Image (spheres, rainbow, N blue to C red):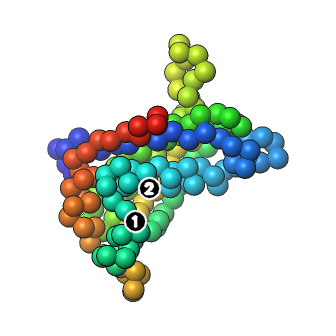
């Protein structure tokens, strides 16, 4: 993807009681769920149905690697903005950088970065679960479109 703008996507999530631990802080593993939702909504915004991809082309995306840094606590009722960026788009995989920001309460405050992650996602064929080429229309959409969640 060298020379091209880095596509990105923003998706808003509200923290619910079920997302928190006994201390009232977002449970660490839930950031992976938040990041997954943002990537899924990005595909949906690009017109890609993962169910149709699986049924019609015999392909699916799977997570190969994750690494998350937790920087500040998010709590019940916080509104988080998940910003996803493609770091590398390969033939069979995509490396995402994803960041969770707490939306500020006051208009004068800056969003606070609460967690950041790097997620490597691979395309596999559903029968053999072996690497498969990302379909050209999806690659093209990732390379050229910057779409933001209409609900953010």
Front one among 92 and 12? 12
- Looking at the rendered structure, the secondary structure element under dot 2 is helix
Image x and y of residue 77, in percent: 68, 35
Residue that protrudes farthest toward the bottom in the picture: 128
- Looking at the rendered structure, the secondary structure element under dot 1 is helix
Image x and y of residue 98, in percent: 46, 46
Q: Quadrant of residue 5?
A: top left
Q: Are marks 2 and 1 in contact (CB under 8 Å)?
A: yes
**Looking at the image, which residue is at 47% across and 65% down?**
63
Front one among 81 and 89? 81
Q: Let me know if residue 102 appears in the view.
A: yes
Image x and y of residue 8, in percent: 34, 42
| Residue identifier under label 2 | 40
Relative to 8, does residue 59 appear above or below in the rendering?
below
| Residue identifier under label 1 | 50
| Alpha carbon distance from label 2 to label 1 | 8 Å
Relative to 40, does residue 111 appear above or below in the rendering?
above
**Looking at the image, which residue is at 27% across and 52% down?**
142
Front one among 15 and 25? 15
């Amino acid at each position: 993807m060298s020379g091209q703008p880095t596509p990105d996507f923003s998706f808003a999530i509200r923290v619910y009681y079920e997302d928190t631990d006994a201390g009232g802080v977002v449970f660490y593993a839930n950031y992976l769920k938040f990041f997954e939702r943002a990537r899924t909504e990005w595909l949906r915004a690009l017109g890609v149905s993962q169910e149709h991809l699986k049924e019609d082309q015999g392909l699916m995306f799977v997570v190969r690697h994750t690494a998350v840094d937790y920087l500040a606590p998010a709590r019940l009722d916080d509104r988080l903005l998940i910003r996803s960026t493609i770091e590398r788009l390969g033939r069979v995989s995509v490396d995402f950088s994803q960041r969770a920001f707490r939306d500020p309460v006051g208009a004068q405050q800056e969003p606070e970065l609460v967690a950041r992650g790097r997620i490597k996602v691979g395309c596999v064929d559903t029968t053999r679960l072996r690497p498969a080429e990302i379909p050209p229309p999806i690659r093209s959409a990732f390379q050229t479109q910057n779409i933001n969640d209409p609900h953010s």
